[in-house]
Image (cartoon, rainbow, N blue to C red):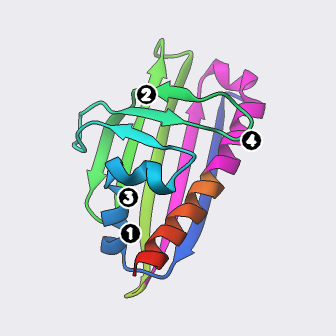
Amino acid sequence: MLSRTIDTWIDIEASPDRIWDVLVDFPKWSTWNSFIPLVEGILQEGQTLKIQVNPPGLKTMTFRPKIFSLTQNKEIIWGGSFLGIVYRGEHLFLLESLNENRTRFRQIERFHGPMVLFMGSMIKKTKKGYHQMNIALKNRVEDVE
């Protein structure tokens, strides 16, 4: 299998714009997000960020994803590749309004390329990290309300 997808979600009792405000406040991620405690850079399409990821049971990893797409209060898509065809990945943060005060927050990660054949354990641990981050975001947003 040369591609895999992680798709996690959580419903948050808040509007998309309230969640967006917390999501794009990168300097404060370390106070609530143990999975991705560091994001540095300018939130703008085409910009490259520096992120640290702490998947459960794995060493801290540093990535430099490029922002592919950005739609305020709706989505952030970033990603990168290794030698173009060996590995390519993209991470989506999506805010889907369910009603005026309830939003589904989704994280989707798409992994592509031959390297995916050797990433099974890492992908499972990463999925756990996404669930942890989803819960932490929900708690952060709903506690601040």
Q: Which residues are magenta?
A: 102-129
The outermost residue toward the right is 121
The outermost residue toward the top is 83
Q: CA distance from mark 4 to mark 1?
A: 26 Å
* Tag 3 near tag 1, CB within 8 Å: yes
Q: State the residue position of label 2.
A: 80
Question: Residue 124's mark?
Answer: 4
**Amino acid at the residue labelled 3:** Leu
Q: CA distance from mark 4 to mark 3?
A: 23 Å
User: Which residue: 32% across, 55% down?
Assistant: 24
Crowding near the residue tagged with mark 1, few <14, some 14–19, many ≥20 C-alpha atoms within 10 Å: many
Q: Where the N terminus falls, by quadrant?
A: top right
**Amino acid at the residue labelled 4:** Lys
* Tag 4 near tag 2, CB within 8 Å: no
Frontmost residue, 63 versus 28: 28
77 displayed left or right of 128: left
Q: State the residue position of label 3.
A: 23
Crowding near the residue tagged with mark 2, few <14, some 14–19, many ≥20 C-alpha atoms within 10 Å: some
Estimate the x, y position of residue 86 in percent, counting from the top left. 56, 15
User: Which residue: 44% across, 72% down?
Assistant: 141
* Tag 4 near tag 3, CB within 8 Å: no
**Amino acid at the residue labelled 1:** Ile
User: Which residue: 52% across, 16% down?
Assistant: 85
- For residue 97, which quarter of the picture? bottom left
